[in-house]
Image (cartoon, coloured by chain):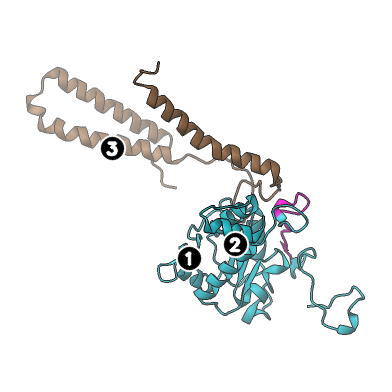
Chain colours: A brown, B cyan
Amino acid sequence: MTNSPYLPVVVLLLAAIAFTVSPLVLAWLWAKKFSPHKPGPSKNAIYECGLESAGDAWVQFKPGYYLYAIVFLVFDVEAVFLLPFAVAFTGLTAAESIAMLVFLLLLVEGLVWAYQKKVLVWT
Amino acid sequence: MDEKLKVELGKQGIFTTTLQELYNWGRRNSLWPLNFGLACCAIEMIATTMARYDLARFGAEVFRPSPRQADLMIVAGTITKKMAPQVVRLYNQMAEPKYVISMGACAISGGPFKQGYNVLKGIDRYIPVDVHIPGCPPRPEALIDAFITLQKQIDEQQLTGVGRPRHLDPDAPSEFIVPQFGPHDLEPPQNPDVWRPPLVNISLAGKNESGND
């Protein structure tokens, strides 16, 4: 055991634990002996900027923005893939063209869905 | 321990101390002010922390943005009646031990705005102030002087017994009344446990009746 190469590591580990835990224990003992515990409504308040917190933090937000994000994705991804598709169009086989058209169809479906949801209507 | 014996031991290279001295030494040299300015005095407070005046020499350079981590409140500036509840609540939210420096004429008494309808006539109406600094605004040297005064005050505090500071006394309050911003004035207009209006008519002295402000 004394010849184990990990012995210094264990010693250092113990020293590190003692170094970190002892101030906490000392502070706890000090509080027990001298410094009385004094909680209060202001001190225990969650918000700490001098103002009283108003209302509940568990409120609902309308996540309307995700619709814009989806529509943006439809046009953005479409543009990113359509340009290489157009450049390589003459050299593509029929299967590849059909795969690309299926992809386009999916995006168009998304657009139709957004149209039905009246996302495109500017209110 | 006898003071002479302590000095004699110190000459021989033996350092002696008491728990109280060690405690006060630690508190005195690690005053963390609250990062909180109200008016133009705050500019002088900022200047005090900067390189030219360098408050860090006294262990107080760490201005904390949260009252949970601060133990010194420098009331630097005019306290409007709208702001007073927030100041008191911030003081309440600070962890013990906590100290207050009332910086400048406004924080002491309302200063040049004392006649204003919406100016609190001194923060010591609501919270216990340790050091007052006069001036409009006080120079950074004055703030440093207040710091040293506060450090001296801390150094003389007792750990146990009757004269011990508030935070060591289980019966002493840690939080003070937060005034409400009422339609005419703050309610209550002062905390009677902390401050009472001074007597203005000497004939009333002893009759337990105080003058009006």
SS at circle 1: helix
Query: Which residue is found at the position 47% from the left and 69% from the top?
Result: B48
**Mark 1 or mark 3, whichever is nearer to me:** 1
Amino acid type of the residue tagged 1 in the rendering: Leu
Q: Position of residue A102 (x, y in %)?
A: 25, 23
Query: Which residue is found at the position 67% from the left and 79% from the top?
Result: B114
Seen in the image, is A113 located left or right of residue B160?
Answer: left
Q: Which residue is mark 1?
A: B55
Residue found at the very far top of the displayed protein: A1
Q: Which residue is mark 2?
A: B73
**Magenta extent:** B167-182
Q: Residues within 10 Å of mark 1 (few under 14, many from 20)?
A: many
Q: Chain of mark 3?
A: A
Is residue B113 or residue B198 the one in the foreground? B198
Question: Do badges 2 and 3 share one subunit?
Answer: no
Q: Which mark is residue A75?
A: 3
From this viewpoint, is residue B71 visible?
Answer: no
Is residue B136 or residue B38 the one in the foreground? B136
Q: Position of residue B206 (x, y in %)?
A: 91, 76
Q: Quadrant of the N terminus of chain B?
A: bottom right
Seen in the image, is A89 located left or right of residue A30?
Answer: left
